[in-house]
Amino acid sequence: MDDLLGRMTDMDKLRDLLDSKKSEAARMIDEKEMMASLKGWVKGQDHVIDDLTRLIRLQWGKEKRKRPIANLLMLGPTGTGKTELCKAMANYLFEDEKNMLLFDCSEFSGSEGKTRLIGTPTGYVGAESGGQLTRPVLNNPKRLIVFDEIEKAWSGIFDLFLQMMGDGRLTEQGSGRQADFTQSIIVLTSNAEHEAIGKIQNEIDDLQERADAVKKHLRDSKIFRPEMLGRFDRVYVFQPLEGIVIAEIAVLKMIKSAQAYGLELEYVAPELVFDAMSKSDKLKEFGIRELERVIDEMLADGLLAARQIGAEKVKLVLDDEGTLVIEPVDEE
Ligand SMILES: Nc1ncnc2c1ncn2[C@@H]1O[C@H](COP(=O)(O)OP(=O)(O)OP(=O)(O)O)[C@@H](O)[C@H]1O
Ligand SMILES: [Mg+2]
């Protein structure tokens, strides 16, 4: 019996050793691979992705950390890929989009926001269920945590952010347990002042100078308290999307539409889509968020027809009237 126990402990030791080797491997990030993965999702923001990948790779490699892996502020106009990049990061770094926690700060405009995030004190209704921020992190600390429209949050919430971003810890009310954020990435996003910030972006080339100027502007316009700004490892400014970038995104959506019908879409040059878009009123008038629906509606008939004749691959062509149509690819 003792012998058996002894062997089991050896097995445990071996397993621990293997686990530690595995986590060493897990601590390494392949910069090229990560960059390619993020750029496959998010177009036209390479300046953000290049720097972000480098930052994350270096921080990820640390054995011990007293703060989150990174505290990031993402600024820029609506619909430029801020949330999309967060999803891409969660997917690449934390295995699944589901490991992203997304909070809309316009819902935290009052003091009750605090109890929603970190739980209700003992003795009150709901104390045992914990906070919407602390509980998921207690269950799995490897998270991408996004707070959208940060400027809309009640100012008291900022004290929680300071603690989370500075000490990497928050105590859950009710349970008293400590949620650990040292394996998480924190992202705050804002559209505030995006015009003024976009101007700074265009006027200053040097990245460090530009980041300093953006921080100064945010401080002067009183959107963030100085101690809050000091907690960010990076401030990223997303650029408005240009026509050709929108066409690239359209191609991504087309690949997705084709996949939904079990079809593979042959390479599409973004320029082709760009031309079609600049000629078609129907395609010109919609916003980026409608893109998926518009493309789906535009291609669905063609995709279904191709599927029905048993095609596996399709291509996109411009017909005589300048409309984009789907044609099956003959594989012989
Ligand atoms: N740069 C981009 N690359 C790829 N897709 C994009 C990009 N920008 C926007 N999109 C598409 O538009 C949709 C909306 O973008 P997203 O949610 O990332 O905007 P946002 O910058 O977070 O805006 P908001 O400030 O309003 O939250 C995404 O689902 C995505 O399909
Ligand atoms: Mg967003």
Image: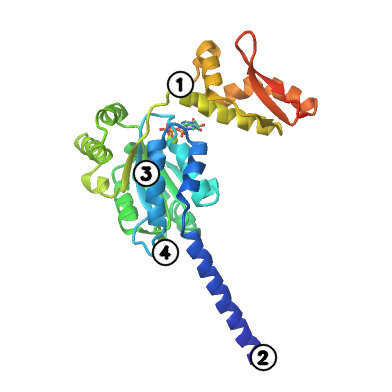
- Dividing the picture into quadrants, the one containing residue 177 is bottom left
For discs 3 and 4, the disc positioned in front in the rendered view = 3
Which residue is the site of mark 3? 51
Q: Check disc 2: other Cα within 10 Å, few if <14, some if 14-19, many if 20+.
A: few
- Residue denoted by label 1: 243
Decide which of tag 1 and tag 4 comes sooner along the chain. 4
Say what secondary structure mark 2 lies in. Answer: loop
For residue 105, side relative to residue 30 (left or right): left
- Asked if the residue under mark 2 is in contact with the one under mark 3, i.e. CB atoms within 8 Å, the reply is no
SS for dot 4: loop
Secondary structure state at the residue bearing disc 3: helix
Q: Is residue 115 visible?
A: no
- Which residue is under mark 4? 177
The image shows residue 101 at horizontal and vertical percentages of: 47, 47
Mark 2 or mark 1: whose residue is earlier in sequence: 2
What kind of residue is marked 4? Arg
Q: Is residue 198 visible?
A: yes
Point out the residue furthest to the left here.
Answer: 220
- Which residue shows up at 58% across the image and 82% down it? 9
The CA distance from mark 3 to mark 4 is: 35 Å
Which residue, as the protein is rendered here, is positioned at the far right? 309
Considering depth in this image, is 224 or 51 the residue closer to the camera?
51
Q: Which residue was labeled with disc 2?
A: 1
In front: 196, or 109?
A: 196
Can you tell which of label 1 and label 4 is closer to the viewer?
1
Which residue is drawn at the image coordinates 51% and 52% (left, top)? Answer: 94
Q: Earlier in the sequence, mark 3 or mark 4?
A: 3
Closer to the chain start, of discs 1 and 3, is 3
Q: CA distance from mark 3 to mark 2?
A: 57 Å
What's the residue type where badge 2 is placed? Answer: Met
In the image, is 279 to the left or to the right of 210? right
